[in-house]
Image: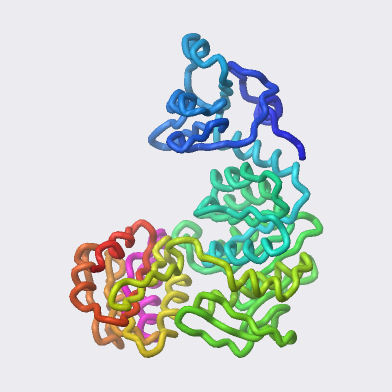
Amino acid sequence: MNQLKLKDIIKITNGKLIMGDENELIENFSNNSRQIASGDVYLGIKGERLNGSIFFEETFKNGAKGAILQDIEITEDIAKKYNDKFIFLVDDTVKAMQQIATYKRSFYDIPVIAITGSVGKTSTRDIVANVMATKYKTLKTKKNYNNHIGVPLTIFELKDEEALVIELGMNHLGEISVLTKIAKPTVAVITNVGTAHIGNLGSRENILKAKMEILEGLDEDGYVVINNDNDLLHEWYLENKDKYRIITYGIDNLSDFMAEDVALEGQRSTYTLKNKNEKVEVPVGGKHFVLNSLCAFAVASIFGISDNQVKKGILNFELTQNRMDIECLKNNITVIKDYYNANYDSMKAALEYLGGIKQNRKIAVLGDMLELGDYSENLHRMVGKEVAKNNVDILITVGNDAKYIAEEARKDVDIVIECKSNQEAIKEINKIKREGDYILLKASNGMKFGEILEGIE
């Protein structure tokens, strides 16, 4: 395996070595000054409010071997004080990270599966990575490290792995273009095109355009894996099926990998893989997780992973925290935590999951969906219609725009409670909850719905 040295970083970033040995071996990076480990290289990122480079001395005291910094003066006294460290200055630390990550990616001739989409990319990432891990030592994106900083940090973690499953996120046009050219995927997965960030992008057609930027970095012999049930992706497939190596998955539209005899239960789903007579169990309820598992079958087919291995990987995968995460409280009350982010598509999926639960009272606690711009009122009203459609017994809303959810749902839902704050919602939940209830907590991350979970008695 090729080794990354400081002199390589000097060459590819065109920065300036202030002090240190250019033959220093670089193995681990961190941009968190509080969690730096011995031997790490500290990346001082400059944000809108604070330049992280000012904390480099703290990282040196905690064992960092060197630092890559910007917009900071290094005095002679500091150079003498830390003469066993290195300090390297660049014009832009984030750009330098991306350049270094691109260079490090070139060391690895391994499967790289890049996943993007308006909703479901994290859960798809988790299930695909678990399936890939049945054959390969696999690294996957941690937490929400899917942006211009997170993608380089993920690639920096590559050591002796044999496969990488990496998530690419975006808020605007042009962002995935940058990320895919760093990751250079051998397989590009697009889970769907919905309404997330439509306030920034203006239309679903522009969202499709943004997602398809993933193809700019795709290996020339690479594969594209798409959810063929999504209307815009289905249209794209029909127009481009002769231009790319495309593998489709779906439930409704004819696809390469399809589910039939789908049975959705409270905390699991089962189906038969069409044309293979394979019975598949998914340890999470909801139609969208059936689609995620079909995506895993599609990806696995590229790498010769057997159906039995795929089924094992699906059965044993675990969701990233706060994404359709199930927690059982006292009195047999079940809370569905899905408040990392929210848009119409993920709201719809979560409500369909809740609606599929039988013989229990269903309470939906829904908050504002953010970053929707001029589309906000209409999309919140559409969520209200989904509440009614999925036989929710009680609706509690929190936030300014969530009032539109309440207005629409009130036409068909008997009990609708509008709250101005999380604390008010907590009081209402504790007043009405009873044994055996299922409670869905769903909102954008900025609504801080974790507070509600903590307040349920």
Q: Which of the pair 2/194 is nearer the observer?
A: 2
Q: Which of the pair 394/317 is nearer the observer?
A: 317
Q: Is residue 30 above or below residue 392?
A: above
Quadrant where the image shows the C terminus: bottom left
Figure coloring? rainbow
Residue 422 in view (yes/no): yes
Taking the spot 28% from the left edge, 71% from the top edge, the residue there is 397
Q: Position of residue 354 (x, y in %)?
A: 41, 80
Q: Is residue 442 above or below residue 220?
A: below
Residue 234 in view (yes/no): no
Q: Tell me, yes or no, whether the highlighted magenta stretch contains residue 43.
A: no
Magenta residues, start to end: 363-389
Taking the spot 44% from the left edge, 75% from the top edge, the residue there is 350
Determine the main secondary structure of the stretch shown in magenta.
Answer: helix
Query: Which quarter of the picture shows residue 242?
Result: bottom right
Judge from the rendering whether residue 344 lies leftward or rightward of residue 244; answer left or right. left
Q: Position of residue 155 (x, y in %)?
A: 63, 45
Q: Which of the pair 303/213 is nearer the observer?
A: 303
Query: Which quarter of the picture shows residue 164?
Result: bottom right
Quadrant where the image shows the N terminus: top right
Q: Position of residue 262 (x, y in %)?
A: 58, 87
Query: Which quarter of the picture shows residue 326?
Result: bottom left
Judge from the rendering whether residue 54 lies leftward or rightward of residue 105; answer left or right. left
Taking the spot 67% from the left edge, 28% from the top edge, the residue there is 25
Q: Position of residue 295 (x, y in %)?
A: 65, 71
Q: Give the total number of marks visible in the rendering.
A: 0
